[in-house]
Image (cartoon, rainbow, N blue to C red):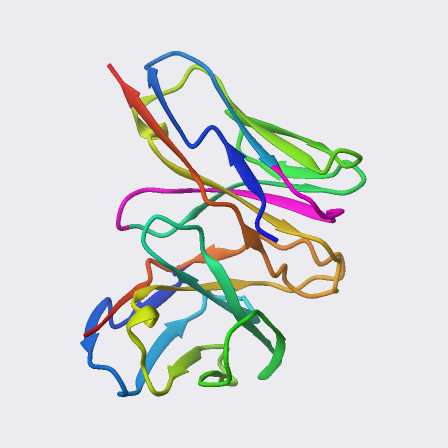
Amino acid sequence: QQPVQSPQAVILREGEDAVINCSSSKALYSVHWYRQKHGEAPVFLMILLKGGEQKGHEKISASFNEKKQQSSLYLTASQLSYSGTYFCGTDAYNTGTASKLTFGTGTRLQVTL
Amino acid sequence: ETGVTQSPTHLIKTRGQQVTLRCSSQSGHNTVSWYQQALGQGPQFIFQYYREEENGRGNFPPRFSGLQFPNYSSELNVNALELDDSALYLCASSLTRISGANVLTFGAGSRLTVL
């Protein structure tokens, strides 16, 4: 089942902060966050694993609540370049090979001057 | 290092036809996954190839098939095209490690329109 993201869309002024949430009905092994600009490839932002390991970019942080099966992406001091659609992708299992992600429907973020 | 490249970038087909999409993995990556992204939706997992064999499949019919070659490049084939197959097809490569938590590197996709 597809994870649910909220909000569906958000408009920020440059410098403001935003939080994007991702909620799953399944127990999760990992949560991946991607940003996609129109007509471009999704770009990796962050991966969070069951047990607390994280990998990602410096200016973006995220949390993963394993018990609640939820993850949140925190965007601080937003820049115009942060505009795009953010997707969370979830994987319920550690299969020993690359994750087979189930993506949410996305959160459209627009940063204005 | 080169990223993931896909071809063609755009193509138009008619119902019932067959299509082949191609993907070159990022250098050093040994696993390739294919996703279908309908307009305004998140990507949906089609299947994954590791060591030239299918290693997991999403909820897609058998007319969606694939190949992975010894150089880790890949093809996605779709037979008997339907109107609902119109979408952006994304290829993602990764390096499988023991932990299984791998960053997927996506290509820009092939946009297929079925008329």
Q: Is residue A86 above or below residue B77?
A: above
Query: At which x and y percent is residue A66?
Result: 77, 37
- Compare residues B25 and B57 and report the one nearer the observer: B57
Q: Quadrant of residue B22?
A: bottom left
Q: Nearer the viewer, residue A4 or A109?
A: A4
Left/right placement of residue B12 relative to residue B68 reads left
Residue found 58% across the figure and 56% down from its top? A101
The magenta stretch spans residue B14: no
Q: Describe residue B101's horizontal placement relative to residue B79 as left or right.
A: right
Placement of the N terminus of chain B among the 4 image quadrants: bottom left
Q: Is residue A24 above or below residue A57?
A: below
**Residue B57, horizontal then vertical, whole percent:** 59, 73
Give me the residue at 45% from left, 56% from top: B43
Q: Which residues are magenta?
A: A23-39
Give the answer, above or below, for where B64 lies relative to B83: below
Residue under the point 49% across and 81% down: B71
The answer to if A31 sits in the magenta stretch is yes
Name the quarter where the C terminus of chain B is drawn.
bottom left
Residue B106 lies, in percent from the top left, at 43, 57
In the rendering, at what x and y percent does residue A26 appear?
A: 72, 48
Count of picture labels: 0
